[in-house]
Every structure is written in C-alpha cells, then in structure tokens.
Image: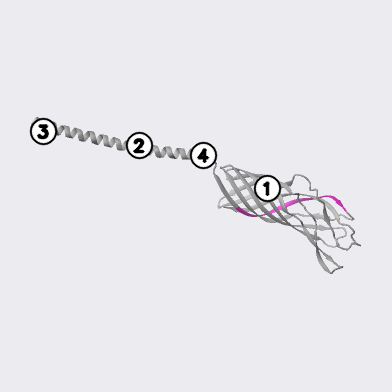
Amino acid sequence: MNMRYRFLISTIIAFALSSATAFAQSDYDSYDYRVNANYARKTVNKALANQQPRVTTEFGLGIGVRYNFFDVIDMKGAFSPNITMNLSYGAALQFRLNLGRTFGIQPEISYAYSTVKLKGGEIGSTIKAKSNLVQIPFLLSFRIAIVRINFGPVFTVMDNPSYMLPDLTEDSIKTCYLGNLYPAVTYAAGLSFKLPKNMMIDVRYADQFKDIKKVNEFLWTLDANKQSEPITFRTRTRSVQLRFGLVF
C-alpha cells in the first residue's frame, strides 16, 4: 500500500474518531442540561408553593355535651323557686377555610337541647322548661401540628325556653315562655385535636361578655287569684363543652 492510500485511511479514521467523541460529548451535555432543568423547575415550584398560602376547605360534623354554670340574679316575686340547668346535648356542623398551614377561619352552626328545672316555693311539682338553642360561632383558628387553638364570637339565633301550664278556665294547655337565657353575642375559646381517620375532639369554654339585660318571667300557675304577676329574674350562663366528630 503506497503512502497516498495510507494517508487517506488515516485521515478517515481520525475524522470518525473525532466525530464520535463530539457526538458523545454533545449527548452528555444534552442529558446534563435536561437533568439540571428538571431540578431547577422542581426547586422553583417548591419555593413558590412554600411562599404562596394554600387555600383548602374542611367540613365537619360532631355531637357533644356541655355542662352549664347557670346563675340566677335579680329575682323578684312572691317566692323564689330554685332554677337549674346543668347538662345540654347537641350537634354541630362546621366549615373551615384554611389559609396556609397555620391560620384558618371556622364558622359553625350548633344546636343544643337542655331542660331548665324550676321547683320549690308554691310549686307543687317541678316544672321543666325545654330549651332549644341555636348559635353560630365564628372562630379564628391557629394550627400547631395536630392541635388547633380556636376563639371568637358566638351569635345566638334561637333561644326562648318554653313550658306548659294548664288553663283551668278554658280546660286547655298553654305554652309559656321564660325569655332569652343568652345575649345576642357571646364568645368561645378552646382547643381541638385532629386525630387519625378524620376524627376530631373539641374542648371549649363559652361565656358572656356581659350580663343579659332582658328580664325573664316565670308563672307557676295561670290562676290570677294565686299569682297576680310573674316572677322576674335575669340569668348568666357559662359552659364547658366537649364534642366528638369527623372532618372531611
């Protein structure tokens, strides 16, 4: 093989090796660029997710009990009956708007049933007034791990306990009303714990900003000869509440 052919073959081999090396380097650079681009995109998305608050919602349904601290003040009348209201039972429906991981707004609709017992004095037997209470708590909430700190105003929608008395003059039964036991606006504060399987335990304390101004009235008989005017009093009610429920 003469020198001309040797030189030509050597040139072709050198060109092929340089082309393969350049192609391999280009492919490696392209792969490295794709990896870096994907990593950068994930990093940016993660940073944006951490910066921007996530808005999520929750719905909850619970049942519970409340122990009432029921105080009677400014009672006036011919005699002073003993008036008590200890336990209430009820349910609540809640909606929660989470603004980020910590802060939330939680409006609720709660219902509680209780019995107001009036006895003593001229009453031959205990008279029981049925109380159906509907309130709308509007709570602010702060979350720390599974614990949520809740507090805010509570608006009373329905509150007018009633009881039945016989009307001997008309041979019928009439409904009488005690009047409101709660002010229009009260407040509540407490803790709730979100447990596995969407379970929730809520403990709270409810109280009044100030004493109710409306006067309650009580008749133990509809016979004007026995009771010419109703007994009047005012109330102050506080409670400790315990609720079990599910959130979704």
Q: What element carries label 1?
A: strand
Q: Which of marks 3 and 1 is in front?
A: 3
**Disc number lying in front (3 or 2):** 3
* Whether label 1 touches label 4, CB < 8 Å: no
Residue range of the region highlighted in magenta in the rendering? 60-76
Q: Distance between the residues labelled 3 and 2?
A: 41 Å
- Pointer 4: what residue? 50
Q: Residues within 10 Å of mark 2 (few under 14, many from 20)?
A: few
Which residue is disc 2 drawn over? 32
Residue type at tag 1: Arg
Identify the residue under disc 1: 204
Callout 4 amino acid: Asn
* Badge 2 element: helix
Which sits earlier in the primary sequence, circle 2 or circle 1? 2
Q: Which residue is drawn at 62% across and 50% down?
A: 201
Secondary structure character of the magenta stretch overall? strand
